[in-house]
């Protein structure tokens, strides 16, 4: 079956702009989690959505937000971009229950200039 | 965040050697652990998992050992190959309960860079 897909794969923005990233989970998976990966901080959990509801949230400012649609596809939005937001943004999907094995997409590389 | 100022540990081995990658986890309540492999330009890929009621689990060429007493995980790769070169992450799963259902949140370790020389 098809894996997790993320679009776009690469994005260049300037400070102050906003960006929306998209994630399509594996068919049948209802949970989508988002992570930020940087060389300095590693993999940091942003938030998790399950059945269109945010179930869990990491320690990021309110500029980072997300949503999930009825087909389990998810988007994350970052407003008022800062240079420090440059990172690889990873999406992972899972069934969301007791088995929390998460499958990752290839990520979106965001560069903020 | 959970990790600050990362300088990833590195492990260099010769092709055919066995590799051991270590990971310390922080939450004694975590009861599910996963090892991921991340190759350059790709997202992390699941390798093997283990639940806290086990000390050891074996897969194809990989073995995970769990020592709950000292909160330590290790990943052993047998007969390491150049294709095994990647960054390896351990992740611990912390459970939450709400609305009658349980769900987990993964916290990742800093990662270890494995380089395999032919």
Image: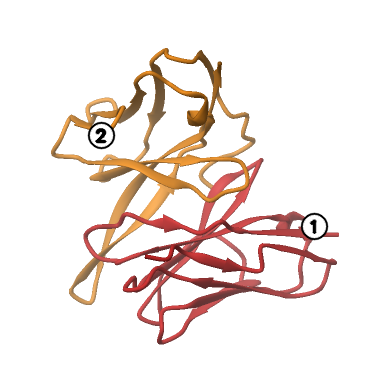
Chain colours: A red, B orange
- Judging by the rendered image, the residue that carries numbered circle 1 is A83
Q: Position of residue B25 (x, y in %)?
A: 37, 35
Q: Quadrant of the N terminus of chain A?
A: bottom left
- Does A93 appear above or below B7? below
Residue ID at (35%, 80%) = A51
A54 sits left or right of B43 in the view: left
Foreground residue among B17 and B101: B17
Q: Determine the secondary structure under disc 1.
A: helix
Q: Chain of mark 1?
A: A
B18 sits left or right of A13 in the view: left
Q: Position of residue A12 (x, y in %)?
A: 80, 64
- Judging by the rendered image, the residue that carries numbered circle 2 is B59
- Quadrant position of residue A36: bottom right
Mark 1 surroundings within 10 Å by alpha-carbon count, few (fewer than 14), some (14 through 19), many (20 or more): few
Q: Chain of mark 2?
A: B
Mark 2 surroundings within 10 Å by alpha-carbon count, few (fewer than 14), some (14 through 19), many (20 or more): few
Check residue A3 in the rendering and tell me which mark sits there, or answer none.
Answer: none
Q: How many angstroms separate mark 2 from mark 1 (CA)?
A: 42 Å
Q: Quadrant of the C terminus of chain A?
A: bottom right
- Quadrant position of residue A16: bottom right
Q: Which residue is outermost to the left?
A: B53
Q: Determine the secondary structure under disc 2.
A: loop
- Does A110 appear above or below B106? below
């Amino acid at each position: 079956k098809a894996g997790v897909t993320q679009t776009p794969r690469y994005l260049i923005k300037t400070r102050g702009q906003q960006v929306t990233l998209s994630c399509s989970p594996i068919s049948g998976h209802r949970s989508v989690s988002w992570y930020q990966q940087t060389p300095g901080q590693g993999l940091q959990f942003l938030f998790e959505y399950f059945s269109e509801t945010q179930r869990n949230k990491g320690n990021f400012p309110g500029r980072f937000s997300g949503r999930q649609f009825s087909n389990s596809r998810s988007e994350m939005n970052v407003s008022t971009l800062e240079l420090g937001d440059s990172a690889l943004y990873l999406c992972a999907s899972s069934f969301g229950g007791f088995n929390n094995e998460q499958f990752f997409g290839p990520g979106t590389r965001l560069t903020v200039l | 965040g959970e990790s600050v100022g990362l300088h990833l540990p590195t492990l260099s081995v010769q092709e055919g050697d066995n590799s051991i990658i270590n990971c310390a986890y922080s939450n004694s309540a975590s009861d599910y652990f996963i090892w991921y492999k991340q190759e350059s330009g790709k997202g992390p890929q699941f390798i093997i998992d283990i639940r806290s009621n086990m000390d050891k689990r074996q897969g194809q060429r990989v073995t995970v050992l769990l020592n709950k007493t000292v909160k330590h995980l290790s990943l052993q790769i047998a007969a390491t190959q150049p294709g095994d070169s990647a960054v390896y992450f351990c992740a611990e799963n912390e459970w939450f309960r709400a609305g009658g259902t349980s769900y987990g949140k993964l916290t990742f370790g800093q990662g270890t860079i494995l380089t395999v020389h032919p």
